[in-house]
């Protein structure tokens, strides 16, 4: 099926003329004659059946149609250029993986491990898309995302990475009145303020119930929308927090946090590498996925 699309030369001429508001400056930019740019723009206007420019005081000004058209085609031209430069630089090997990551896991777990990844795979470039932009895999600039949840998201495949092993932790000395500075039983923790993550409000209830403790009193306490804030709250002595072990290894090693009770309970939620099915064969994604899965948690 033939696509309804003008030539790339016409689009480049139009974009350059719009950017410079001049056929002459566009010609210098494209290293062609002013007449060639003018001809390509006229040809594009004929193809589209609409005027894209008007002359105002010997200066090119976009029409309303031209402004709308430029807003749609300019990003696409930039994407084509970026893809071409990337392919030329990589000669078809590796490539760039556009990925979004939750900030706390990125800072505490992923980034410290990336030197190892790049040492093994210098042919792959990771480009982090702002987490705030969400996980819309219909966007061309998002190939994969690290998400927190139960692993079920419509429109994407998900591979468990890490994070289901959670620990109740607090500042050293908070449980000083307990024998050995650690809660004698899980139920003992209910005598202290419990700190919660807004995304996992059921975490304490699940943890205590799994250990046979009545969890009706476990829902009260301060709530935080990021694990980094929850960690800092525990370090500051605000109470006891349930946090994935992978996010607090440094704090435990430095003694900023201690384990309040040693019971091992797996959370229902963790961190997953997610990607759309149509992109699962991207070389850069396959390489990154294989590396991530090497160190995946054993959660059985």
Image: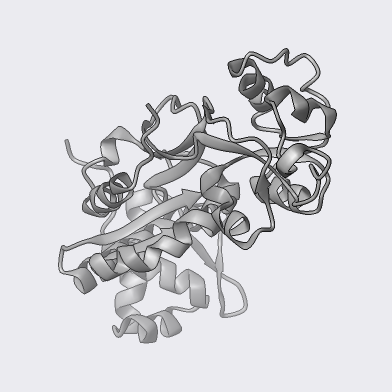
Coloration mode = one colour
Judged left or right of residue 155, residue 246 is right
Which residue sits furthest front?
179
Q: What residue do we see at 56% from left, 78% from top?
A: 59
Would residue 162 appear left or right of 263 to someone viewing this image? left
User: Where is 172 relative to 29, above or below?
Assistant: above
Residue 222: give x, y in percent of width and height.
Answer: 82, 36
The location of residue 209, given as percent across then percent down, is: 64, 16
Give the residue at x 67% y 51%.
228
Q: Quadrant of residue 278?
A: top left
- In this view, the residue in front, 259 or 135, is 259
Residue 102 appears in the figure: no
Relative height, residue 265 to residue 136 (above, below): above
Task: Please state if 59 lies on the left or on the right of 81 as rendered.
Answer: right
Numbered label tally? 0
Q: Quadrant of the N terminus?
A: top left
Where is 285 relative to 12, above or below? above
Residue 153 is situated, as x and y percent measured from the top left of the image, at 45, 27
Q: Position of residue 27 (x, y in %)?
A: 36, 82
**On the rendered structure, is 210 left or right of 36?**
right
Residue drawn 37% across and 87% down? Answer: 28
Given residues 88 and 81, the one toward you in this image is 88
Please report the residue visible at 56 percent of the width from the left and 59 percent of the height from the top: 63
Q: Nearer the viewer, residue 179 or 209?
A: 179
Of 298 and 274, nearer the camera is 298
Can the viewer see residue 20 in this picture?
A: yes
> Which quadrant of the figure has residue 78?
bottom left
Which corner quadrant holds the C terminus? Answer: top left
């Amino acid at each position: 099926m033939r696509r309804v699309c003008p030539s790339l030369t016409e689009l480049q001429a139009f974009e350059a003329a719009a950017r410079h508001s001049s056929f002459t400056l566009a010609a210098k930019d494209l290293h062609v004659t002013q007449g060639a740019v003018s001809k390509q723009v006229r040809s594009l206007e004929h193809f589209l059946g609409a005027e894209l420019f008007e002359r105002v005081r010997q200066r090119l000004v976009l029409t309303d149609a031209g402004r709308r058209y430029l807003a749609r085609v300019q990003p696409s031209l930039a994407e084509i250029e970026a893809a071409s430069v990337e392919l030329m630089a990589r000669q078809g090997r590796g490539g760039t993986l556009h990925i979004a990551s939750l900030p706390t896991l990125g800072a505490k777990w992923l980034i410290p491990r990336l030197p190892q990844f790049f040492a093994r795979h210098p042919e792959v470039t990771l480009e982090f898309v702002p987490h705030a932009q969400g996980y819309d895999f219909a966007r061309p600039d998002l190939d994969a995302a690290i998400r927190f949840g139960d692993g079920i998201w419509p429109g994407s495949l998900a591979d468990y990475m890490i994070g289901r092993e959670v620990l109740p932790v607090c500042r050293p000395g908070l449980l000083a009145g307990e024998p050995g500075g650690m809660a004698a039983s899980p139920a003992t923790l209910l005598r202290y303020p419990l700190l919660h993550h807004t995304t996992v409000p059921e975490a304490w209830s699940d943890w205590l119930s799994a250990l046979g403790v009545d969890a009706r009193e476990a829902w009260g306490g301060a709530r935080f929308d990021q694990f980094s804030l929850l960690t800092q709250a525990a370090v500051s002595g605000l109470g006891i927090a349930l946090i994935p072990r992978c996010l607090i290894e440094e704090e435990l090693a430095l003694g900023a946090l201690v384990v309040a009770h040693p019971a091992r309970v797996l959370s229902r939620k963790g961190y997953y590498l997610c990607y759309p099915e149509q992109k699962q064969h991207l070389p850069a994604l396959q390489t990154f996925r294989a590396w991530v899965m090497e160190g995946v948690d054993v959660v059985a």
